[in-house]
Image: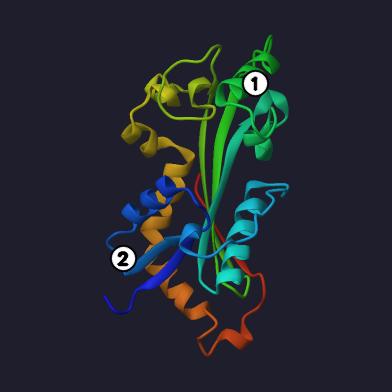
Amino acid sequence: MNNLTTLVIATGNSGKTAEIEALLKNFPVKIKNLKDFGPIPHIEEDGDSFDDNAYKKASFASRVLGLPALADDSGLLVEALSGAPGVLSARYVGENATDEERCAKLLFEMKGKSNRKAAFECVISIAVPAGNALTYVGRCEGLIAEKPSGTNGFGYDPIFYYPSLNKTFAEMSMEEKSSVSHRGKALAELKSEFSKVLVWINQNMPDTDKFNVIQGCEKTDIIIR
């Protein structure tokens, strides 16, 4: 275990860190998060897309710490609302709004609309200090329910209905949700590719001979449908 690759999860969320650590437990990787280091400036998630925000968080953490870093961004896109709330999903009613308030506002905006199509999307970005990054995207199609149902999950889960299982995300068990959700799909693809990801990280870190010829901000997209 002397050749572990350190990967920083660009969050202070211990639950998210533990989830990724469990996912990658059979790989030669040591997982850390931002709480394992000194104070790091807050990054404003002001990008125009989930990809922008995930990459911004991952690349900033990687440059500051000199280590490869992983970050994700996700949200809900509603067809009848022209893709809203989108990147503003967490701030749809304001910075300090509750999940119940966000769901209530979205249901209000959907009153009288027959098109209930929606999708959750998650982007995972893994960056190295030079700016290069790998991108994984997970997407889950569903419908906006007429009213909240279920007590599991968080965010918009009570009003996101998944027809194949005839349940909202909030009515699913953790295992059910992970098997079909946007984040679950992105993480599953990351795990399936992680041996290659480790090779890519080690080839692109500053202490390799290739550091001086890296093209800045090159990004490789891996899209899941």
Coloration mode: rainbow
**Image position of 47 with respect to 199: above or below:** above
Instruction: Name the image quarter holding the N terminus.
Output: bottom left
Furthest residue in direction bottom, as rendered? 209
Query: What's the residue at 61%, 64% (across, down)?
Result: 59
Query: Residue 127 is drawn in which quadrant?
Result: bottom right
The reply to whether the C-beta atoms of the residues labelled 1 and 2 are less than 8 Å apart is: no
Residue 106 disc label: 1
What kind of element bears circle 1?
helix
Q: Give neighbour class at mark 1: few <14, some 14-19, many 20+ (Cα, 10 Å).
A: many
**Image position of 179 with respect to 106: above or below:** below
Query: What's the residue at 59%, 37% (across, down)?
Result: 75
The amino acid sitting under disc 1 is Leu
Query: What's the residue at 65%, 21% (across, down)?
Result: 106
Query: What's the residue at 51%, 69% (across, down)?
Result: 68
Query: Residue 31 is drawn in which quadrant?
Result: bottom left
Query: Residue 95 is drawn in which quadrant?
Result: top right
Question: Considering only order in the chain, which callout, 2 or 1, is on the residue closer to the N terminus?
Answer: 2
Residue 209: image location, x then y, percent: 52, 90
Residue 155: image location, x then y, percent: 53, 30
Residue 152: image location, x then y, percent: 40, 25
Left or right: 112 with respect to 74? right
**Image position of 114 with respect to 60: above or below:** above
Left or right: 22 with respect to 148? left
Q: Name the residue beneath numbered marker 2.
A: 27
